[in-house]
Amino acid sequence: MGTTQLETVPEPKYWHLKTVLSEALDQDFAVGEVLPNERELAARFGVARATLRQALEQLELEGRLQRRRGVGTTVAPPRVGVDVGGTRHGWPGESSDGWEAVGVTETLPPTAVLKLLGGAADQPVHTVRRTRVTHGQAVAAELLYVPAASVPGLPAIDAPAGPARARAVLRELQRLALDGQDRSVELGSARAEDAKELDRLPGAPVLVVTTRYFTAEGTTAVSVATYRADTCRLTFGDSGDVEITHEARVAS
Amino acid sequence: MGTTQLETVPEPKYWHLKTVLSEALDQDFAVGEVLPNERELAARFGVARATLRQALEQLELEGRLQRRRGVGTTVAPPRVGVDVGGTRHGWPGESSDGWEAVGVTETLPPTAVLKLLGGAADQPVHTVRRTRVTHGQAVAAELLYVPAASVPGLPAIDAPAGPARARAVLRELQRLALDGQDRSVELGSARAEDAKELDRLPGAPVLVVTTRYFTAEGTTAVSVATYRADTCRLTFGDSGDVEITHEARVAS
C-alpha cells in the first residue's frame, strides 16, 4: 500500500489516467450521469484516444462506469450484492430468491456439464432456463441441466416448453433429498442469448457460477448461471449482506 | 440453446470469429503453443485487425488464451480450481492452503474496508500482505486488514515489517474465537503492485474476494484477495474439487 511502493512499479499511461479519471468521477459527476464523448474527454485530459479507451475499460471492469447501448458511458451506481448462498443448501426454486423460470428445452449439454453429470454424450437432458431479477433489473441468466433419470416422475411432454413445464421440472427435483452442493465462480464472456437477456453486448465480462447438486444417487443436476459482472457483487456466507463496494480495492 | 435461438440474435463479426478461432484452437494448437502474430491471423481469417483483437479479447476472458509479456499470445491450459472455502471456517493462516505471509505494514485502510471494520478514518491498521501459490504459480495476492484493537497482545514493533512479524499478527488472530465469516466475489482490475506479483499487466481482469471475519466483538479482520481471473476458477462448498472448465459455458 501507500504511494511509495506504487512508485517503484512502472506505471502505464492509461493507468495514471484511470486514477485521475476516477477522482474526477468522484468530484464532478453524479451516478447515472452521461460522460462526455471520447474525443472531448481525450482533449480535456490531453491524451490519445487509445489511452483514454484503455482507462475507460479499466473503470468499467471496476464497476465505476457502464457502457450502455444507445446511451453512452454513464457513471455506475455501486454494485448490488447478490446472494449466491454459501452455507445454505436448497434446490433451485425452493426459496423466493428472485429467480423466475422462463422455459425448458431438451438439449445435449456442453461437454463439461456432461462430465459433471456423468451421462451419455448423445442423451438430451431437460434444460431449464431461468432469469434472476434484483431491484427490477435482470442480473443473471441460468441454464439448469437435469437428466431425465433424475426426474423419472415428470409427466411425458403434455405442455409447450414454457414456464409451466419448467416449474414442473423444478418441482420434481424438489421431491428428492438434497445431500449437498458445491459451486465454482469464474470469469467468462456473455453468450449472445444471455447478453440479450442481461441487456449487455455479446462478449461482455460476466461471472459464471456453476453449481452441482448431489443426492444419494450422485450428481443430479448442474446449474450454469451467468451474472452481470458490471453491476453484481456475489455474496456468500453467514450474513449475505456484506456491504462491500469496488472502493474496498480501488481506494487507498 | 441450439442454433435456432442464436440465429435470431444479431451476431457481431468478432463473435463469429471467436467461435471459429475457438474451434481452430481445439484442432490445430496445443496448450502453451504461441499463436501467430495478429497480422498473420487477421490475414488467415480474412478479417480486420480490430475484429481479430476483439475476438482474442473474448477468448482471453474465457480463459482460452493468455497474453504474456515478452512471449505473445499462447493457448491457455484449463483453469485451476482454487478452493476459497465455502462452509469451512477458519482464520487466515490456520490451514496449509498455499498462502504465504510476505510482510506487514501499518496503513490507513480503503474507505470500504474501514466501513466494514467500523474503525476511525485516521487510525492505521496492521496490513498483512500474503501471496497464494498453487502448482508453483502465484494465483492470488491478499491484503489482510487487522485493527490494533483486534490483536492487543501483539508485541510492540520489535522486528522489521517482514514475514516474521506478519506471522505474529496471524498467530494473535488465531488465539481469538472465530464466530463466522462471509465473503463476496466481484470483478476488478489488477492494481500495479498486485499485477507485478501475479505476473500480469496492471489493469488485467481479476476476481476480488473480500472476506469479513467475525468474533463476539464484531468484525475483527477483513481480507481483500485478488485472484488471477485468467488462470483461476474459485471453488466453494462441500467438496471443493469441482471439475469445471470454461467449456461448461462456451461449448454447446
Image: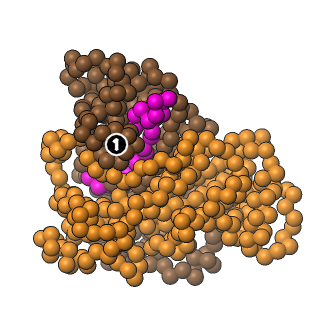
Chain colours: A orange, B brown
- Numbered disc 1: secondary structure: helix
Q: Is residue A198 above or below residue A86?
A: below
Region of the chain picked out in magenta, as a range: B202-226
Where does the image place residue B195, in percent across and percent down from the top left?
A: 28, 47
Say which residue appears at 43% left-offset and 45% top-offset: B209
Say which residue appears at 18% left-offset and 58% top-offset: A16
Q: How many marks?
A: 1
Q: Is residue B247 above or below residue B46?
A: above
Q: Is residue B250 above or below residue A89?
A: below
Question: Would you say B153 lies left or right of A114 here?
Answer: left
Closer-to-camera residue (B114/A141)? B114
Say which residue appears at 73% left-offset and 61% top-offset: A125
Say which residue appears at 37% left-offset and 66% top-offset: A76
Q: Inspect the magenta stretch and tell me whether residue B114 lies in it.
A: no
Does residue B115 appear in this view? yes
Question: Would you say A154 lies left or right of B29 here?
Answer: right
Where does the image place residue B95, in percent across and percent down from the top left?
A: 48, 26
> Which residue has dot 1 on it?
B114
Amino acid carrying mark 1 in the image? Leu
Does residue B230 appear in this view? no
Question: Would you say A92 lies left or right of B208 here?
Answer: right
